[in-house]
Amino acid sequence: MLVWRGMTPIRTDIQASLQTYLETHDLHAFREIEYKGVIFFRGEFHESDSCVPESYLQAQLGSWSNLTIPKRIALFVSTLSHCAIAILEEWRMRRLGGEVVCVISNHEDLRPLVEGYGVPFYYIPTANVAQSEKRQLQVLRELHVEVIVLARYMQMLSEEFVGRYTQQIINIHHSLLPAFVGAAPYEKAYERGVKLVGATAHYVTEGMDEGEIIEQQAGVVEDGGTAEHYKVLNHPIEAKVLLAALHQHLQERIFIYDGRTIRL
Amino acid sequence: MLVWRGMTPIRTDIQASLQTYLETHDLHAFREIEYKGVIFFRGEFHESDSCVPESYLQAQLGSWSNLTIPKRIALFVSTLSHCAIAILEEWRMRRLGGEVVCVISNHEDLRPLVEGYGVPFYYIPTANVAQSEKRQLQVLRELHVEVIVLARYMQMLSEEFVGRYTQQIINIHHSLLPAFVGAAPYEKAYERGVKLVGATAHYVTEGMDEGEIIEQQAGVVEDGGTAEHYKVLNHPIEAKVLLAALHQHLQERIFIYDGRTIRL
Amino acid sequence: MLVWRGMTPIRTDIQASLQTYLETHDLHAFREIEYKGVIFFRGEFHESDSCVPESYLQAQLGSWSNLTIPKRIALFVSTLSHCAIAILEEWRMRRLGGEVVCVISNHEDLRPLVEGYGVPFYYIPTANVAQSEKRQLQVLRELHVEVIVLARYMQMLSEEFVGRYTQQIINIHHSLLPAFVGAAPYEKAYERGVKLVGATAHYVTEGMDEGEIIEQQAGVVEDGGTAEHYKVLNHPIEAKVLLAALHQHLQERIFIYDGRTIRL
Amino acid sequence: MLVWRGMTPIRTDIQASLQTYLETHDLHAFREIEYKGVIFFRGEFHESDSCVPESYLQAQLGSWSNLTIPKRIALFVSTLSHCAIAILEEWRMRRLGGEVVCVISNHEDLRPLVEGYGVPFYYIPTANVAQSEKRQLQVLRELHVEVIVLARYMQMLSEEFVGRYTQQIINIHHSLLPAFVGAAPYEKAYERGVKLVGATAHYVTEGMDEGEIIEQQAGVVEDGGTAEHYKVLNHPIEAKVLLAALHQHLQERIFIYDGRTIRL
């Protein structure tokens, strides 16, 4: 599938381009939405023999990409497996639309699980952040990684690191942002007595848990639920949310604008 | 159904009482839960001919009530109907376990709908808050109201009013508290780009939207959703959440402790 | 919003038409899907001053319609209110995209509720089916009804009646079809011990509960649920499902093909 | 946690026993439900030093068990991993309340994944059913297996095999039973055009897909969904349903009566 997407304040420009593209490619799906005076658009075209012509790639409006070329993904994990396994399972079933090229962890715990999937596992301790990030960046470069997924990594990345992969790092936070930012969200949620747990996948920016939200889902807390129930109930939600966010990123569905995402 | 409920730091006290009650009444359901060193308990007993004996009513541990005696409910509304209609429908189907004795509103809009259900409608304008509350309290007293439901009433009640009906006033807020307190929660949610809408039913206390949370539910925002979609999607959720909270209140399932509710 | 939709085995025909239409109208959304060698397509265009030109209306491929012209709807009810009220509420909030022009019932029970919404209520007893259908058809013709919604009407319509409103009559069945066809689906579901209840909105055809399925939703049966719980739990689901099906019908999203619907 | 459970037509017998047990054990939770004149009950008691006394174990009414003693579980798989991995993950997180002692498969595909969890993997081809079942039964006996989970095993077991493990074998079927029994349920569901997919966990009996239903969940089919979408959407549901059913079985929540289950 070929995707053409972009944003512009002028709707007629989109229509003119669409008309041109229809001469050589069949439209499968198209949507546009207006937000604060800007029109965001995304179209899916069937691939033809000629694939994306040079002239399209130089399009002044929006950009073209070919979804059949899988993006290269690195998973960052710590000791919890649920989020990483959900992604590895999807990848193993050939449903991810991306290639998991490595798992990087500051603990050895998940090595046997990850290697069971045939994915290289890099153990990089984080006692010294500067050194560990240097080593991480080296691995990412060598493997030509395009998307980094923090699958309950539980470590902050430096500004410099984040700056190198702008809008390419996705994190999962175990609360319904903007509620319960930062540490111990389960405990905070339990203390406040909220009746929903949930998780938020977002792009990583410099501020903690302040990146643009990609995906959120919630689960109902049962009557009489304890703090432990909040956690048990939330783990599968975290896995689902992170996986759904990654799918949308890989399908080029997400626009970032004015501190939020718009998904088409 | 007879309900016995209470809280105590000493679990064995509960067991001793339970044993006594089992001599004359059949237990249908029982649960206890510990929170911060206190044990909350709630038991349901089948009614017998003797109903609740005097000796039970004077129980030092917890309290007894008879759910077959319906509590008397007043709905406060403004111009939006969805929450009020959900409660009136449930009541009409004889599923509420409570009696809707009046609807009070600062607008005439909903009169024909409410009167269609055969419920008295009181139009009390709120231009002068002191006068309108005086009139409202008069109606509530005359009709022996025990539970007040703010079904998208959109007006603040005075401290004095709230103080007279402590833990008897339930409000619906159209966001997932603690996120988006106060005015315009749809707009705030849309601006932040959250991917879930939702609603929160809570007891009314003096602070705005800070009362103890009784019930919350969420709904998924679709890709490309506009601000209007947030509202359209949220209305049925608000109705469901408020109704569910009212049910739990009427079934004596809710304990208030340390700034939150515990539901059994 | 203008909608252009149709089906064809030749994808390139769609693209050629699309290109033509883009000359005068802005595309808002488009999707196509292939099912058994046929391509179904649906496009939404922004309205322009010229609205739908004559030349479009004579399009050989598919058909054009203008969603801003509301379709005229009749509700058929018996004694249960939940489905009818959900539709009346949506209509009152101006969210339905259609006009409820009458409610027809074989009982007087719902008259006050319906008249509370300002909608004419026709009491047509069904002791004699031939006579009652004659009277019903007369009302439908006089009011130029285009869509008939059986909102828990609980009566069979004759072949002749159904034949006059092919693909224009929507029914709600209180089970997840194809399971539990016909009478007493709650009881059958409870006996079988299924752990989900649910409802199905479908077009009415001559066979009972065999029409093409438009929408289905399910609800989880709680542990220890009784037969009564199945019903209580299902009523709001029925209302939601019927409303969702009606929305899709009014938005011209539904294609009927080979015994099923395809929704775009 | 100690569990006491059983069924009887006489409610007062339950109450008398309860009273006795309360002398030495603290009740945590209790529920009873009547179905066709029989009362099913289940109580949870806190463990005390004395654990379950001899006299309780000989109780004429119902039976006692100790949930802290984990049941021994065997997973039967073929080539699909999603259901098995969900159970292995839960077990790895020490949330299962049971011990996965082996995985038995007729294919080698899942060996590396399973061994990554440190669980023994037995490859037993099924070309000759009599021989393979003999070998399977030998493994089950040697490992003292108490619960068998068919995690998308895709093979029928013989009557004799099933008879040896009555009410101890749980299967997952990839449709919402009683709809779409037998082979190819995705395809049947797609052909019929149902708008919900779903899965059913049930006890294995001699009839195909006719065992007592333990758990069911459903997922909404999106507009324009293809047959492939039905499958992709259903896999995570299958994993959730099977895991939830296993949890309920291990917690001794399920009664089988009159062709269905009752869960408390």
Image (tube, coloured by chain):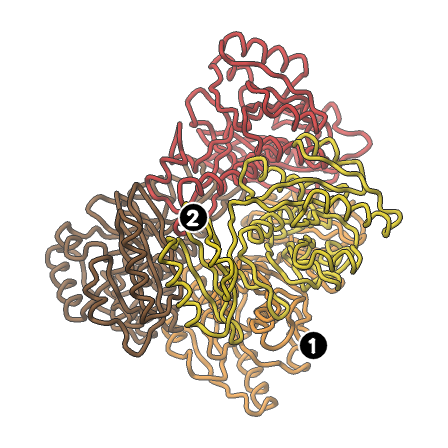
Chain colours: A brown, B red, C yellow, D orange
Q: How many marks?
A: 2
Residue at 39% x, 47% y is B195
Whole-percent x and y of residue D49? 54, 49
Quarter occupied by the C terminus of chain B: top right
Q: CA distance from mark 2 to mark 1?
A: 68 Å
Whole-percent x and y of residue A233? 46, 51
Quarter occupied by the N terminus of chain B: top right
Whole-percent x and y of residue D196? 57, 61
Q: Is residue D36 left or right of residue B148?
A: right
Residue A190 seen anywhere in this rendered image of the structure: yes
Q: Above or below — where is C190 with respect to D84?
A: above
The subunit letter for the residue under badge 1 reads D
Type of amino acid under label 1: Glu
Residue hosting label 1: D206
Q: Nearer the viewer, residue A131 or B136?
A: B136
Q: Which mark is residue C50?
A: 2
Q: Is residue B54 left or right of residue A73?
A: right
Q: Nearer the viewer, residue A36 or C82?
A: A36
User: SS class of the residue under badge 2?
Assistant: loop
